[in-house]
């Protein structure tokens, strides 16, 4: 008898899961204990093993798709077994949900006809949806397509670069075939699970698939680019293409040269050019038909200003005009605004300011770095000291939930890294157990990955405490907003040389100011002060961390 397998609850806070990869295909034999799929939860990507034996008869959630816990994931049974009753039941529930969301009978019938079952798709055709590439991602923007319609795609090929709320990430294909349809053009944004692309056998007609997918409400932003593509054929509704074309023409005019000739550039290249202040008319495109792409902006070297232009008064005239640039908020910037606003206005912040003597730390670092092939920074010392202090004050290493408080026994320290689009927080895991050199190597590697947008989700998840250091920018003191669900964040300023009192005499000393922002729901004032006292002992006498 067939066994229905639903989306499992793989963590205590998991409400929905995303199928990252299927390790079995329909028709494959499954043994008890075999890994069926890799499922991305709200915490990590985890392997999901089968507790049943038989043949994989049906897959209910395709790779990249997200569904609630207990949604039909797969069906396992005897080879050739009739499972239509299970699928019919699932289909009827989907139709009922659609009726509640849309009272129009014609749309309901269309949804019922198109269905959500992969049985409706032409043979070999796979619908690729907007993947959930981060734990907080709600929508994504296609920065660049690496494949064009009609091109062959191999499993593992990079289909596109997708901008999430955290970074721009490469999205690889888990299928092989021909790219038959692109649902989102470069620069367009859509919700997770919206139609991204369709892959299948060359020459397959998938117009009905794309149309039905859009009709079901899964890809609300797909119609605009589709109308733009089909306008020359005069096939779509006439009102929509005109509206779309009028909206698209304005940006094109702004990227024209003085002789009104159009400049062809990808949306990502235009965005990068705006941020760097680069005139696209001076950039030579290396893409198809001279199209300016990302690498052209990255490798651009400004041309010298013509003497004649410098001698004229045109530059003064231009400077005397009021002007501004509008830059659309990136998904990362939207996420920063949303998360920090939520933290600031839901967690009752309070701040504790201290100033540490850094003379011993300076001498300690000098001795450590004198060892061949060894290099540690003051930030590495702060990370290690915080990790040691947190082990003694688990209340500061906690997380707040409406019905409970979680005191973490492990110490995972997030280190804030500034990037061009905002802020990323890679995590040094088990920092209390790592050597100073290991912490230094990890932080350096994460900083490079953050600036090149190569950080993985796993490297940015799970922090229990956060450190933000602006000392390298000469900032002496500042406050930070707590990186929830952490209960505290430490702001680290610059080391400053100034007069200090030592043994009753005024001498030249080195000090560093720190500020602890704490959530009063989990960390009382006295608890925060005791943590800083312990931290003071470690930083002012670094050798004590190793006794």
Image (spheres, helix red, strand yellow):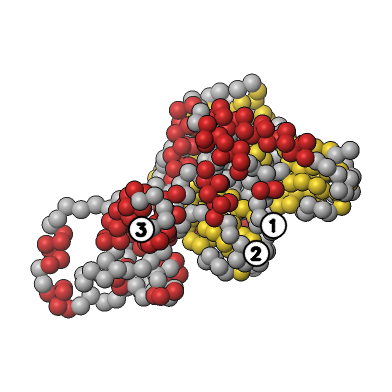
Tell us which disc is closer to us: 3 or 1. Answer: 1
Q: Position of residue 270 (x, y in %)?
A: 37, 61
**Mark 2 in CB contact with mark 1 (< 8 angstroms):** yes
- Contact check, label 3 and label 2, Cβ < 8 Å: no
Q: Which residue is drawn at the image coordinates 26% and 77% (left, top)?
A: 304
Q: What quarter of the picture does the C terminus occupy?
A: top right
Residue located beneath label 2 in the image: 201
* Label 2 to label 1: alpha-carbon separation: 8 Å
Q: Nearer the viewer, residue 286 or 54?
A: 54
Closer to the chain start, of discs 2 and 1, is: 1
Q: Which of the labelled discs sits on residue 265, or is there none?
A: none
Residue at 32 percent across and 52 percent down: it is: 242
Q: Nearer the viewer, residue 180 or 358?
A: 180
- Asked whether disc 3 touches disc 1, contact meaning CB atoms under 8 Å apart, the reply is no
Residue 275 - label: 3
Residue indicated by mark 1:
123
Task: State whether residue 417 is above or below residue 16.
Answer: below
Looking at the rendered structure, the secondary structure element under dot 3 is helix
Q: Residues within 10 Å of mark 3 (few under 14, many from 20)?
A: few
Mark found first going from the N terminus, 3 or 1: 1
SS class, disc 1: loop
Q: Is residue 178 above or below residue 500?
A: below
């Amino acid at each position: 008898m067939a066994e229905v397998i639903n989306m499992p609850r793989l963590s205590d806070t998991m409400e929905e899961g995303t199928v990252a990869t299927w390790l079995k295909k329909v028709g494959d034999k499954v043994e008890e204990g075999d890994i069926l799929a890799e499922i991305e939860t709200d915490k990590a990507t985890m392997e999901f093993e089968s507790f049943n034996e038989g043949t994989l008869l049906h897959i209910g959630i395709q790779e990249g798709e997200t569904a609630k816990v207990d949604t039909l994931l797969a069906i396992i049974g005897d080879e050739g077994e009739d499972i239509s009753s299970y699928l019919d039941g699932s289909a009827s529930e989907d139709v009922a949900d659609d009726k509640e969301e849309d009272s129009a009978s014609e749309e309901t019938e269309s949804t019922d006809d198109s269905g959500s079952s992969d049985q409706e798709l032409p043979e070999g055709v796979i619908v690729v949806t907007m993947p959930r590439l981060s734990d907080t991602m709600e929508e994504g923007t296609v920065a660049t397509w690496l494949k064009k319609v009609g091109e062959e795609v191999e499993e593992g090929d990079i289909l596109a670069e997708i901008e999430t709320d955290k970074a721009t990430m490469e999205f690889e294909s888990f299928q092989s075939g021909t790219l038959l349809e692109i649902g989102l053009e470069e620069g367009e944004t859509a919700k997770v699970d919206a139609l991204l692309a369709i892959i299948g056998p060359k020459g397959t007609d998938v117009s009905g698939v794309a149309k039905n997918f859009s009709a079901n409400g899964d890809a609300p932003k797909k119609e605009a680019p589709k109308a733009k593509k089909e306008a020359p054929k005069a096939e779509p509704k006439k009102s929509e293409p005109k509206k779309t074309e009028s909206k698209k023409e304005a940006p094109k005019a702004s990227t024209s040269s003085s002789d009104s000739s159009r400049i062809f550039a990808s949306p990502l290249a235009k965005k990068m050019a705006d941020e760097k202040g680069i005139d696209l008319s001076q950039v030579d495109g290396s893409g198809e038909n001279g199209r300016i792409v990302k690498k052209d902006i990255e490798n651009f070297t400004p041309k010298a200003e013509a003497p004649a232009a410098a001698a004229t008064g045109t530059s003064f005239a231009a400077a005397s005009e009021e002007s501004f640039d509008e830059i659309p908020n990136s998904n990362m910037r939207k996420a920063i605004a949303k998360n920090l606003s939520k933290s600031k206005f839901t967690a009752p912040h309070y701040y504790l300011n201290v100033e540490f003597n850094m003379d011993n730390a300076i001498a300690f670092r000098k001795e450590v770095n004198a060892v061949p092939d060894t290099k540690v920074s003051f930030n590495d010392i702060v990370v290690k000291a915080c990790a040691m202090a947190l082990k003694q004050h688990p209340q500061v290493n906690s997380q707040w939930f409406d019905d409970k408080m979680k005191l973490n026994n492990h110490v995972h320290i997030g280190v804030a890294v500034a990037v061009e689009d905002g802020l990323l927080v890679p995590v040094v895991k088990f920092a209390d157990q790592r050597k100073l050199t290991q912490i230094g190597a990890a932080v350096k590697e994460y900083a490079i990955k953050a600036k090149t947008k190569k950080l993985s989700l796993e490297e940015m998840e799970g922090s229990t405490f956060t450190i933000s250091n602006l000392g390298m920018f000469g900032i002496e003191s500042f406050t930070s907003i707590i990186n929830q669900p952490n209960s505290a964040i430490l702001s680290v300023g610059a080391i400053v040389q100034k007069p200090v009192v030592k043994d009753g005499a005024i001498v030249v000393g080195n000090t560093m100011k720190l500020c602890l922002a704490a959530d009063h729901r989990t960390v009382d004032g006295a608890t925060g002060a005791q943590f800083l006292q312990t931290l003071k002992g470690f930083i002012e006498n670094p050798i004590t961390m190793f006794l």
